[in-house]
Amino acid sequence: MASSIHDLARHLNISIGTVSRALNGRADVNADTRKRVLEAARTLNYSPNQSGRSLRQGATHSIAFMLQPHPGDQQYGEPFFIPFLIGLQAKLAESGLDLIVVMGAPGDYQQERLRRVVETRRADAVLLAWTRREDERIDYLTQTGFPFATLGRSRSGAKSYPSLDLDFEKAGADAVDRLVARGHRRIAAVRPSLDLNFGYLFLAGYRKALRRHGIEVAPELIASGFINEAGGYEVTPQVMRSKAPPTAIIFNNDAMALGGCKALAEMGIRPGHDMAVTVIVDTPLCRYFSPALTAFRPALEPMGQRLAEMLLASIPAFAGPEGPRIIREVWPLELVARDSD
Amino acid sequence: MASSIHDLARHLNISIGTVSRALNGRADVNADTRKRVLEAARTLNYSPNQSGRSLRQGATHSIAFMLQPHPGDQQYGEPFFIPFLIGLQAKLAESGLDLIVVMGAPGDYQQERLRRVVETRRADAVLLAWTRREDERIDYLTQTGFPFATLGRSRSGAKSYPSLDLDFEKAGADAVDRLVARGHRRIAAVRPSLDLNFGYLFLAGYRKALRRHGIEVAPELIASGFINEAGGYEVTPQVMRSKAPPTAIIFNNDAMALGGCKALAEMGIRPGHDMAVTVIVDTPLCRYFSPALTAFRPALEPMGQRLAEMLLASIPAFAGPEGPRIIREVWPLELVARDSD
DNA sequence: CGTTTTTCCGTAAACGTTTACGAGAACACA
DNA sequence: TGTGTTCTCGTAAACGTTTACGGAAAAACG
């Protein structure tokens, strides 16, 4: 069925070594033979067996992105990543690399699937998202010396790997600044309960900005719950039980915001009228919700491109002439003012 | 670094053949040696090199899902597929198969990436989505004899492959029935302009139901545009220009519906009040839009599981004792009545 | 005890590549 | 002409597995 390099060699009456060299653009092959080989490869519809190449070269020419659905995100989820993946794939393709997305089962920390990818050497490097404060995946990868990069920072791994993150700390502070400027003093924060690193960053920015404005950080105005709609719905009433309820809430996640708004509606509180609502990471849901939610938007597709570059720059085999280097960047989020605050 | 089967054999002082047989659960190996091998594999942290296995066996033990972002879906897209992929991955994992998601660049018909996957033998089978009426990918795959299944039907390929589709024809008819029962006679339809098969099915159901109710199908009430928000926004005014404008619109796509509602709003027309709006495929956006959009919902995760089963059943190497068989199924969409009609 | 069967394991080939090495031919140079 | 260099290509080993084959040892059987 599929033609091998042997078929090609037999057809051209030359050795497989020469065929391989011609195909791979090596210098020590006559220009004429190269042309004949390339032509024959086209007509015979030859393309090299990936397993064979990988086995010989010890490289798979593919990068694995670990996609981890959240628990409770059963119905739909993670539209966030699609444009990111588009940028990623475009950049990797330029270097002849394939992007493969490895799905984990929702709920677990994907440690097992990660091990599987690494141990069976299915990819030359992996990309992690949803980084945690202490991230065992990062520990594992640094320990094994497997190349990787992360979307999001972490305290793990001693910064010895490339990472691209969003400036959640600044976004949290900006959100507070904006609300304070609009006259709010009682500002609540709702964030995910998991160890997700962006939750910490957001809260740090929130706290810092409040203090800067001379506003005391009120523990009863900070709540955390599952990072989905149900979590927001369940946890938002907590911050409303305060003797002095908030006049504004910042949600660290779109799904939590939607759940929170549902809870508010049931209390007769209208976002945008009775309560200012801000969301840190914008998604289409924020835009189409009523009232449209003010949110901070990431540049997803450029981020995907950039992280691909950063990952490649860190791998000796792909790095340019100046050698491998570790790049870490933090990108801003852009405020999109809408109707909810 | 990574331990090979040779290391294992040397460590146990037996041959690599025996190690391999022990690991693969063959019968002709002593129970005692097997135990020792498995134990050593665990302590030495051995797991077989995938490239080696694939090369020898001629199988990669992985299934490729071709994920094709739509043109214009730059910002976010395809949340539709995540729960589907969750179901898919869970079922494939039961058979020891990995799911890899291959991203195409947005806009093209992913023919090239498909060829790449097939020719380099990166996967043992592929899964196609967004099937078209005449689908060159299906033609290509049937012609090469490469195993595949589709999410969605097509006229291509003579039904010689497993497929799982939603009953868009019935959903289109049901939508009409419901609107007619609510007193509507002028019912418009907005569908994607591409050759996407579900667009045809939807329109067929729409037409059939109208005729059944003795309502003439009015060409000026049928519009088609790009399958994204901009397309809906651009095309919806067309059906409003009719001398007898519609009192209801059925959108075949959530993004087009959102764009269409935006256009309606600019004309001072309020969905749910001045215009009944129904959407064929439900997404979270339909739920959170205001007014919440009545829509037809698919059972995505079970669909993913089922399509995995169907694909495996069609491949001799994975089919059960009764041999391979081609299964084709059409699943219903469930009406979710909300506020827009 | 002799013969047959079963159990278990080692040997070696094969999968499709890439690449180090060397060799022959052509060429340049003195 | 002799020597060194360059160009081009063939040979063969190697990557890490799986598996067909055969053989030795053990067990079963008469």
Image (tube, coloured by chain):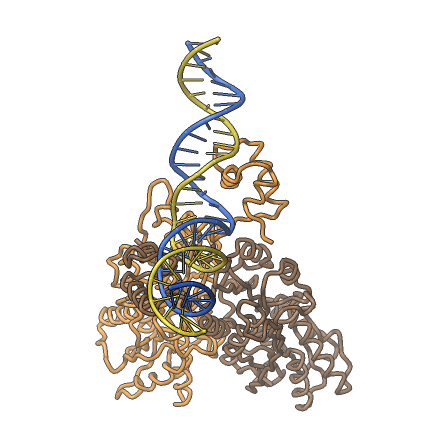
Chain colours: A brown, B orange, C yellow, D blue
- Percent across and percent down for residue A77 are 51, 67
Q: Nearer the viewer, residue A22 or B12?
A: A22
Mark yes or no: residue A272 visible.
yes
Q: Quadrant of residue A229?
A: bottom right
Front residue (pair B175, B75): B75
Position of residue A270 measured from the top left corner of the image (x, y, whole percent)? 59, 81
- Left or right: A38 as drawn, with respect to A272: left
Residue visible at 53% across and 80% down?
A299
- Quarter holding the C terminus of chain B? bottom left
Residue B295 visible here: no
Determine whether B143 is above or below B20 in the image: below
- The image shows a total of numbered marks equal to 0
Residue A238 percent across, percent down from the top left = 69, 71
Q: Residue at x 28, y 61 (%)?
A: A44
Question: Residue drawn 64% across and 63% down?
Answer: A138
Relative to the observer, which residue lies in front, A271 or A33? A33
When asked about the image quadrant of residue B43, the answer is top right
Placement of the N terminus of chain B among the 4 image quadrants? bottom right
Above or below residue B185? Residue B177 is above
Image x and y of residue B316, in percent: 34, 46
